[in-house]
Structures are given as structure tokens and as C-alpha cells.
């Protein structure tokens, strides 16, 4: 189901794994994110259920949910979706992924990730060289940094 | 059964393989002339060179250097025979020198006798000719129908068509699930079953991760095939999803 390879899963990680607790602020931020990316309640429930099973049950609480700071910053990057260039950047990202060497697993993971942001089609066009040639990826937007890591375009140090 | 010419990119690729394996491995001028004669652009060159660098293995080609070189020679010969490249003049002389005198020694090619080009099958005919050259899966149209088994083996059982597979020497022809064909006479009796463009494209797409990594040349080839066959990108994504689901 690829729940792990979605922006919402990434948001849950940010919210929970700071200190093993989820703050009320984080809950509101997650709601905001759900609305911004148009995630259905059903799909959100599937992801959260899986996240509880895979991550939350193994956490040890050590605070009051300090992950909300990182989550707030992350949710802020979602404004990239309103950028008219977001689709072009996604296409360029797809082409960059192809040039970097895209395995079957990486394709599945990254396409799932981009799809949840509504950028799946343009990303796929970049990977599969559909339509006009995608431009070069000048820089990776903060929103897409996690997926750029998955592709191998940038390293953890960067 | 429809013969199809070699694609220019395939011919360029073959000439580049022979060049890098020749004594004069830096014969850029010759490659440039071939490129111009074929109408290929720098992206074709880059894609072919990327593929060569990825698979050359210091000239070992994964232990199959003889087969790779032989296949490349055959392609250049066919390109010159079909006028895709000049058969006379200075370029032809250089190419002949590159190919060398490694002839077939009069060996009869059963596929040629049948009217099936040994290197240019191209169409999505179920009776396309294949080899076990691993490189062919990336650069050949006709061989795109051949490696129907990925690491998970899903296409081996799902392929809707029979297909003919030959070994390097093209000594035998095998038709799985129906009969094993040993002789030229028997080969004549193999029915040619045309398959739909969608099924053919799906088979071609199934080979794109045969080495684990999607190659730009493969993506480019698939893009061109989509255009040729009138397959929409949405259909492509649907097929891709099915393939990935079946292989997982």
C-alpha cells in the first residue's frame, strides 16, 4: 500500500519521533496538511493505522510533542504546491531521477510519494520522457527533499 | 510477418561498441560520421555511451564479449546492406575495417531464409527472433519481445503469445508450450501470431528493469513506441502498475 512512502507518513514521523509524543499543535498541523493535499479521511486513517503499528508502539515518551516545530516547518513547505512552476519542477525531478538510475522499488516509492502531493503525473512524465523534454533541476524545493533523498539526488549531508 | 529496419540508435550503438573494442578505441571522427549519416543527435550518443559504460565491464561484457561483438558486427552489416549507412565510399571502408572479415563462413541463417531479419524484427510479432544477449534487451526492438522474464519471472507465465528464441548461433528455434523446433523445415510451419500493440508494448516494458535500473535509452525507446503505437501515457502507467503488482 506504500503508506510509508507518502508525505503524510513523513509528517507523522516528524510529529511523533521528536520525543515520542504527539502535541495538540501537531494534530492541528496534520489536519491542515490533510486539507492542503486533499487526502481523504479513509486514506489518512489507513496511513495512521499503519504508522501506529509500525512506529508509535515502539516509541518511548520523553516529552510533550516537540516534533510540532519540525512539522510546522514541513507543512509550511506545502505552499510549493501553489507555485505555478511546481509541475515543471516535478517533471525535472523525474528526469533527474531517471538519469540518476531508477530501480523498480525507487520508482514505486517516489511515484507514490509524488502522487499524494498531486505531482505524480508530471513526475512520471519526467521519468518516462513523455511529451516535451523536461528541463534541468536547478534546485530541490524543501517539500521534495525527502523524495530527493530516496532517489539519491542529494545525500543526508546536503 | 513484417521486417523492420534497425533503428538508427541501435546502429549507432553497435558502431560505438565496435569502436571502443577496437585498437583505435578513440575513433571519434568515425562515430561522428556514423552519427551524422544516421541522423542521430548527441542525446542518442550519450545514451549509447552511458549504456556501454554501464555494461562494458572492461571489455568483458559480463562474460559475453564474443556475442556482443558478433551482434554489433551483424548490425553494421545489415545497416550497410539496407542503406541505413553507406555501403561504398570512405565511411563504408572505415566501417568494413571496423567490422573486419568475421564472416558467417557460408552458414545459412534460418531466420533470413524465413524472411525474418536476424536483427531487425521490430514489429510486435509473436514470432520475433531473439537472442540471449543481455544488451539486446536495452537496445533492440525485436529483442524487446524476447526477455519476457524478469527477476520475478512473471511474464514467463503471462505472456499471451508464443515466441521464438534462438541461441547465439541461431541453431535452434524454440516455441514454448507448443513444440520444440529443431530444423529449418519445422520453422517454416511455425504460425506467426500477431499480437496487439498493447500486449507488445507491455512485453517491451517488462524488460525495462531487466538489469534493475531504468536506463534513459529504455525510457526513450518506450516513449517512441508509445507514439508509434498510439498508446497514451495513462495506458502506460496502468500497464506499469499491473506489471509492478504482478512482480511483487
Image (cartoon, coloured by chain):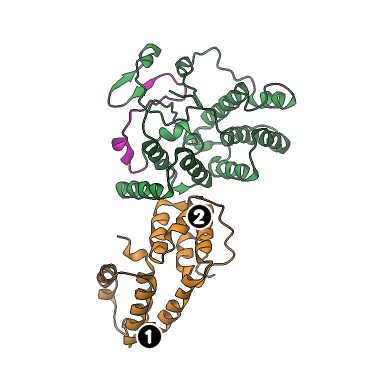
Chain colours: A orange, B green
How many labels were placed on the picture?
Answer: 2
Residue B168 within the magenta-colored segment of the rendering = yes
Where are the magenta residues, as a range? B151-173
Circle 1: is it few (<14), some (14-19), or many (20+) Cα within 10 Å? Answer: many
Location of residue B107 with respect to A61 vertically, above or below:
above
- Residue at disc 1, secondary structure: loop
For the view shown, which residue lies furthest in the bottom direction? A64
Of residues A40 and B169, which is closer to you in this image? Answer: A40
In percent of width and height, residue B79 lies at 60, 26
In percent of width and height, residue B89 lies at 74, 23
Instruction: Name the chain under label 1.
Output: A
Location of residue A137 with respect to A130 vertically, above or below:
below
Quadrant (top left/top right/bottom left/bottom right) for the N terminus of chain B: top left
Identity of the residue drawn at 50% across and 32% down: B64
Say which mark, if any, is on residue B236. none
Residue B221 within the magenta-colored segment of the rendering = no
State left or right for residue B121 relative to residue B80. Answer: left
Residue annotated with mark 1: A66
Circle 2: is it few (<14), some (14-19), or many (20+) Cα within 10 Å? Answer: many
Q: Sequence order check: which comes first, mark 2 or mark 1? A: 1
Identity of the residue drawn at 57% across and 27% down: B75
Q: Is residue B148 something one can see in this rendering?
A: no
Residue annotated with mark 2: A126
**Disc 2, disc 1: CB below 8 Å?**
no
Magenta span dominant secondary structure:
loop
Same chain under badges 2 and 1? The reply is: yes
Identity of the residue drawn at 49% across and 64% down: A148
Instruction: Name the chain under label 2.
Output: A
Amino acid at each position: 500500500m506504500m503508506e510509508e512512502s507518502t508525505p503524510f507518513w513523513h509528517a507523522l514521523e516528524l510529529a511523533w519521533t521528536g520525543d515520542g509524543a504527539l502535541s495538540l499543535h501537531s494534530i492541528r498541523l496534520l489536519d491542515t496538511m490533510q486539507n492542503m493535499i486533499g487526502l481523504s479521511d479513509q486514506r489518512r486513517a489507513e496511513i495512521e493505522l499503519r504508522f501506529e503499528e509500525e512506529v508509535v508502539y515502539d516509541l518511548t515518551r520523553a516529552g510533550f510533542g516537540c516534533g510540532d516545530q519540525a512539522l510546522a516547518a514541513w507543512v509550511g513547505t506545502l505552499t510549493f504546491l501553489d507555485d505555478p512552476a511546481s509541475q515543471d519542477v516535478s517533471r525535472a525531478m523525474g528526469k533527474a531521477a531517471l538519469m540518476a538510475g531508477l530501480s523498480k522499488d525507487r520508482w514505486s516509492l517516489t511515484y507514490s510519494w509524488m502522487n499524494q502531493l498531486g505531482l505524480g503525473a508530471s513526475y512520471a512524465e519526467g521519468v518516462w520522457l513523455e511529451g516535451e523534454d523536461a528541463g534541468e533541476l536547478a534546485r530541490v524545493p524543501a517539500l521534495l527533499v525527502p523524495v530527493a533523498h530516496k532517489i539519491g539526488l542529494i545525500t543526508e549531508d546536503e | 510477418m513484417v521486417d523492420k529496419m534497425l533503428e538508427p540508435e541501435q546502429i549507432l550503438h553497435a558502431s560505438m561498441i565496435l569502436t571502443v573494442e577496437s585498437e583505435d578505441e578513440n575513433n571519434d571522427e568515425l562515430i561522428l560520421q556514423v552519427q551524422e549519416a544516421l541522423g542521430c543527435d548527441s542525446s542518442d550518443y550519450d545514451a549509447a555511451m552511458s549504456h556501454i559504460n554501464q555494461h562494458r565491464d572492461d571489455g568483458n561484457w559480463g562474460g559475453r564479449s564474443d556475442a556482443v561483438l558478433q551482434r554489433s558486427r551483424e548490425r553494421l552489416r545489415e545497416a550497410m546492406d539496407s542503406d541505413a549507412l553507406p555501403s561504398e565510399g570512405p565511411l563504408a571502408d572505415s566501417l568494413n575495417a571496423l567490422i573486419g572479415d568475421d564472416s558467417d563462413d557460408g552458414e545459412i541463417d534460418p531466420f533470413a531464409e524465413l524472411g525474418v531479419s536476424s536483427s531487425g524484427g521490430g514489429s510486435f510479432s509473436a514470432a520475433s527472433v531473439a537472442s540471449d544477449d543481455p544488451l539486446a534487451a536495452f537496445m533492440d526492438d525485436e529483442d524487446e519481445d524476447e526477455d519476457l522474464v524478469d527477476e520475478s519471472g512473471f511474464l514467463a507465465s503471462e505472456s499471451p503469445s508464443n515466441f521464438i528464441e534462438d541461441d547465439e548461433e541461431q541453431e535452434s528455434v524454440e516455441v514454448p508450450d507448443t513444440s520444440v523446433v529443431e530444423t529449418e523445415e519445422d520453422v517454416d510451419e511455425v504460425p506467426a501470431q500477431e499480437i496487439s500493440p498493447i500486449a507488445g508494448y507491455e512485453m517491451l516494458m517488462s524488460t525495462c528493469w531487466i538489469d534493475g535500473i531504468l536506463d534513459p535509452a529504455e525510457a526513450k525507446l518506450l516513449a517512441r513506441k508509445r507514439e508509434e503505437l498510439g498508446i497514451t501515457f495513462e495506458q502506460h502507467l496502468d500497464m506499469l502498475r499491473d506489471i509492478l503488482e504482478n512482480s511483487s
